[in-house]
Image (cartoon, rainbow, N blue to C red):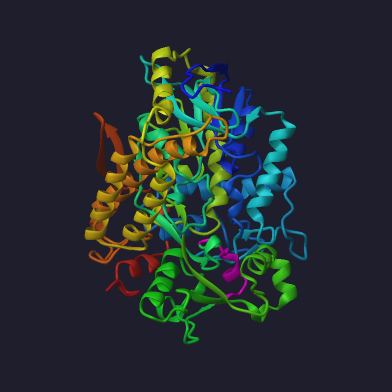
Amino acid sequence: MLDNLDSSYETIEYDILIVGAGGAGMRAAIEASDKGTKVLLLCKSLLGKAHTVMAEGGIAASLGNIDPQDNWKIHFSDTIVEGQSISNWKMAEIFAKEAPDRVLELERYGALFDRTGDGLIMQRPFGAHSYRRLCYVGDRTGLELIRTLEDQVLNRNIPYIDEAVVTGIIKDPTSGAVSGAVVIRIRSGALLFVKCKAVILATGGCGKVYSVTSNSWESTGDGIAIAYRAGAELMDMEMMQFHPTGMIYPAGVRGMLITEAVRGEGGILTNIDGERFMARYDPKRMELSARDVVARAIYTEIKEGRGTPNGAVYLDITQKGEAYIKKKLPSMYYQFLEFANVDISKEKMEVAPTVHYHMGGVRVDPETAVTNVPGLYAAGEVASGLHGANRLGGNSLSDILVFGRRAGAAAADYVKIAADLVATPEDIGKEISRILSPFKATNGENPFDLKDKIAQTMWRYVGIVRNEEDLKKGLEEIQKIRLDSKNVQARGPRGYNQSWADSLSVWNMVLDCEALIMSAITRKESRGAHTRSDYPKKDDAWLVNIVVKLKEGQMVLDKIPVPQMPDELKALLNREEILLWKGKDKSGK
């Protein structure tokens, strides 16, 4: 058994270290391996158990199998429009153009999509998509994606270590480029230094900083914090998406996702009075409006007293019948039956918003996914830029395929020409001393309690509808937790030590929350997922991205104008939608 303060470590060497084995990480590993580089894949959980499986409803790609008029230009427009004009246009262009190829590639890898009568990949409607665009496998699309990519990883014999966490990036002292990373093997508590020329972060989001969330236990924002401490910039941190429909009971599954596919397949929302209330919020798109619109509508119905006694609204798909529901939505059928004893083919579901996806994250180059730190890349939910102020349903799975591939390709090209880099024992030792410090604490803070305080604070003060007073109170509470966390204490032996893992998570979560709240205080308008009751209007003066960086030991924020897109891309945007954003009618008045 390891002594808790034993700072010894094993060193191994690879060209590229990929942190996270969800869809983005595995797709990056496949691409980098195919380009002839030596890749190591790390996952916090077990291989194949990534949070990607929670993306159930489909992969957005303009194949045009059901609606032939669909194409990448319309998908691009939908992404920019629903991102509320702060998405990176270049990322959106690349994404919309390449998504169909990535879906067809997944099919060639062996993914078994639902089919049309002609044998084409079936596509379903989703909120705020102009056409039926979601390629799906019932309501288990993310699971099929993970199974398919895992098969490709194993067939290529790509090395991987599961139950391992990266704690920090080590950089070459001369160039400032990535030279390796410190890793904890969860099973034994042993330390590992991976010497490498590139690191790809594919660690997902930080939804677990909230108490009610569809996110799994892994989603503590580790990659965001690791990147920030390494000198990378963050962006759009205030933009946290609340999915409109999460389970409300029993308490143990509160917040568990109810896929948008339920509404895509015809589910309707009603309040306690039986009113189909979306007619008052978006009469054109109804239940298939953008996620931020539907989430605010449900929030308003509940807040104004038209919710159920359990603090929810009803989602009803009973009209489709048992056979249809079991075929199209098997996971939802059994999820409600097993957890809530509700047969959704005969009974209404009770639903309420749940934290689901972080549009913010690490700022990256749109073409290569590289950060401002040489050799450090990010792809998937941990990266920012594509989704702007609001992500369209289904865009997450195509995002991880498109930019996971691009990150793997760019990192492989980089390591082939990068000079030999140095990782000093002093820098490695400093990181190891930091992560072992919870074992040195005496009468220290309980990390479980601090995680709970973080989650409750964020839900109370930084929720769907925000205001200056609550945000400042939330920041004050998080800063108190940060001070308390300096003396957080881990107990017991190092192997499978949850108190140690939670101690390190608390530090990452606090950092992410401070960046999120400070960005939310800074953005004095309402845009997409960021709604402020004290600044309820959208303001063109805030067509900016808020960038967070580490400068001289302090967290500082800059407002960066959104990059202007070329005129030929501007011409693709849905002008009617843009006018409606600005409170004007179709004539522009």
Location of the C terminus (image quadrant):
bottom left
Q: What is the magenta range?
A: 255-268
Is residue 494 positioned above or below 540 on the image? above
Which residue shows up at 51% across the image and 63% down it? Answer: 254
The x, y position of residue 501, in whole percent, is 49, 37
Question: Which of 39/351 is in front?
Answer: 351
The overriding secondary structure of the stretch rendered in magenta is loop
Question: Height in image: 372 above or below 534?
Answer: above
Q: How many marks?
A: 0
Magenta span has 263? yes
Residue 111 drawn at (x, y percent): 72, 49
The verdict on residue 220 being magenta is no
Residue in the image at 53% along x and 41% along y: 403
**Looking at the picture, how far across and down is residue 14, in whole percent?**
58, 20
Q: Nearer the viewer, residue 1 or 253?
A: 1
Q: Is residue 362 visible?
A: no
Q: Is residue 174 left or right of residue 271?
A: left
